[in-house]
Image: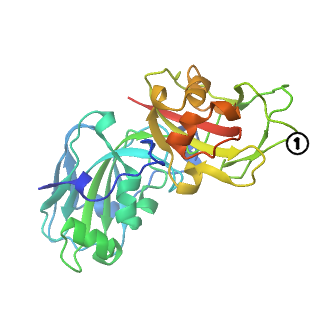
Amino acid sequence: MRRLPALVAVTALAGMGLVGCSASAASSCPTPTDSSIASVVDAAGDFGSAPTVSVRSPFVPQQAGTQTLIAGDGQRITSEKQLALVDVTVLDAATGEQLVATPYGDEATATPLPRLTQAIPSIAPLLDCVAEGSRVAVAIPGSDLGAQGAQALGVNEGDGAVFVFDVRKVFLPAADGADQYNADSGMPSVVRAPDGQPGIVIPAGDAPTEERSQTIKKGDGDVVTADSSVVIHVQGVAWGAKTTFASTWKNGSPGQATVSALPPALASAIEGQTVGSQVLVVVPADQTQADQQALQAPADTALAYVIDILGVVG
């Protein structure tokens, strides 16, 4: 049996190791159900531990479908760009043979879902609305696996695959905290697209000569510490420039890093903040050396960042 991490490459931000609706809105984001899968797939065992999965073979799925085996009540997956950590066991639908599996350790060892959806894009829509804490069975016909996915899994042409996912952690798609009033003058302003992606509007005039930060949105989640492994979206703009030099939004997936490993201005700005918050940071031109090394920021100019704090691992 092969281990899933060998299947695809790790997502990263620059050179730095950065890699919906809420549960209360479950009625508008229903748990996926496909009774045809429930009749042929069984996954015994507790959530978070390696399940004993069996398929009543031969099973040739005619169309893709999802069946919830254990219903969670946490944050829901509502965007293909949203980061979730999963454990998964994959079986050949036709033979019932187990093909690959993740280690099923703690939350920190779980696999980022984008790794799987990059190799097998048809997985992503089948996990729409699945909540953190859920175990779901997903059946995918051979025609939907794609050549890359079928080859990586070792599935015969025309045969389908059955995936059993334990959704260990789902992170916010964007900062969802309460808007905050800031009276500081000379700071950039922030605008947002419908999906929450921020835009930074640089004001006329000179940049601040001291490091400054503002809380734009205040979340009500866990408090971030210097030792936290934090999941964030970052948007960075040079003072006076019209294009970004760093954007996890553009890359399609948020990043993950230990707070103390971030450039000093970013680390100090988000330490003590809460999950769900959005923070605006300005770094003076003479204090950007770490940003140049970690985020390929331009030299000799002040920098402005918007950081969305999406969650903490562990």
Residue at 30% across / 64% down in the picture? 139
Counting from the top left corner in percent of width and height, residue 73 is at 45, 37
| Closer-to-camera residue (113/257) | 257
Which amino acid is tagged 1?
Ala
Residue at 75% across / 51% down in the picture? 241
Which residue is identified by label 1?
204
Res 309 → quadrant: top right
| Closer-to-camera residue (121/26) | 121
From what the image shows, is residue 55 above or below residue 10? Answer: below
| Closer-to-camera residue (228/124) | 228
| Closer-to-camera residue (30/302) | 302
> Which quadrant does the N terminus fall into?
bottom left
> Which quadrant does the C terminus fall into?
top left
Residue at 57% across / 19% down in the picture? 272
Q: Is residue 128 visible?
A: yes
What is the secondary structure assignment of the residue under circle 1? loop
Res 274 → quadrant: top right
Q: Is residue 280 visible?
A: no
